[in-house]
Image: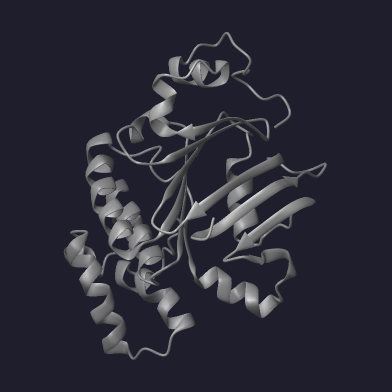
Amino acid sequence: MADAILRFENVAYHTATARDTIENISFSLERGKGLLVSGPEGSGKSQIMSLILGRNLPHSGTIFFYGNQITQRRTEEMEMLRFSIGYVAENLGLINNLSVLENIILPLRYHTVLKEDELIAAANIWLERYELKHKEHIRPVALSASEAMRTALIRALIVEPKILLLDGVFDGGCPLASRYLQDLLFEDIRLRNIGFIITTYFPFFFEGRDLQFLLLYRGRAVFQGAIADIKTTDNEFAVQYRTLNKLGPMKPFNKDL
């Protein structure tokens, strides 16, 4: 707990119009460690991300960032907190009228006093590593799925975040490209001691990684452990999700959405 960057203590969020709700969610994220969050549609995966980013406030429970309650921070403090978080949404959020290079350096323009040549130098390191140097002047609309994903990841990493949030980013890409990208990304995360949370419908794709695992169903935590545990646990929710069996405690379709 002493190394915890982020901590949820019995956090709940629910409204009449909320697509995702959560109830009594607790977990702790340490520096350099990762949490994989999974579950069917409407389980609350994206709502956890929104709460971390301060877009919504919990109705009960407490969220701590480095031991300080997020809900007690002023607006300017929340802006600084968001800058310490690298976030990539499922749709990647790239700006189509900006080039790859311009997308990548955009957060540095807003939050640093780096000069133009310093911005470009910082971006070039990442463009070379993620094999995108030849695409730096291309706009996102002309990128492949893998290229767009790499651009969005670089934009999140270039600010040297304390926490990296990846919301469904790996769910729709080429498995081979995604596996190679995972290897690059996890190495960069380890070298920089970044805590990270990944939401996904496919936790099996991360087997063999040293990750904690949180399985949600309709806003509640129905299984918590290590990702390796989903192969051996007799938890009925984890077994159903692992085997993709339509018979079990989880319903394939959420009529509440």
Find residue 16 and report its image quarter. top right
Quadrant of image for the N terminus: bottom right
Of residues 173 and 178, the one drawn nearer to the viewer in this rendering: 178
Q: Say if residue 181 shows up in the picture.
A: yes
Residue 25 point in image, percent of width and height: 66, 42
Name the side, left or right, on which 146 lies relative to 236.
left
Query: Image point 30% across, 51% down: which residue?
Result: 186
Of residues 63 and 136, the one drawn nearer to the viewer in this rendering: 63
Residue 98 point in image, percent of width and height: 38, 70
Query: Image point 44% across, 85% down: which residue?
Result: 112
Find residue 40 and report its image quarter. top right
Query: Image point 51% across, 72% down: which residue?
Result: 83
In the rendered image, the residue lying farthest to the top is 247
Count of numbered labels shown in the rendering = 0
Q: Say if residue 144 shows up in the picture.
A: no
In the rendered image, the residue lying farthest to the front is 2
Residue 88 point in image, percent of width and height: 45, 56
Query: Image point 51% across, 21% down: which residue?
Result: 238
Of residues 208 and 128, the one drawn nearer to the viewer in this rendering: 208
Name the side, left or right, on which 131 lies relative to 220.
left
Residue 105 point in image, percent of width and height: 36, 75
Q: What colouring style does the render use? A: one colour
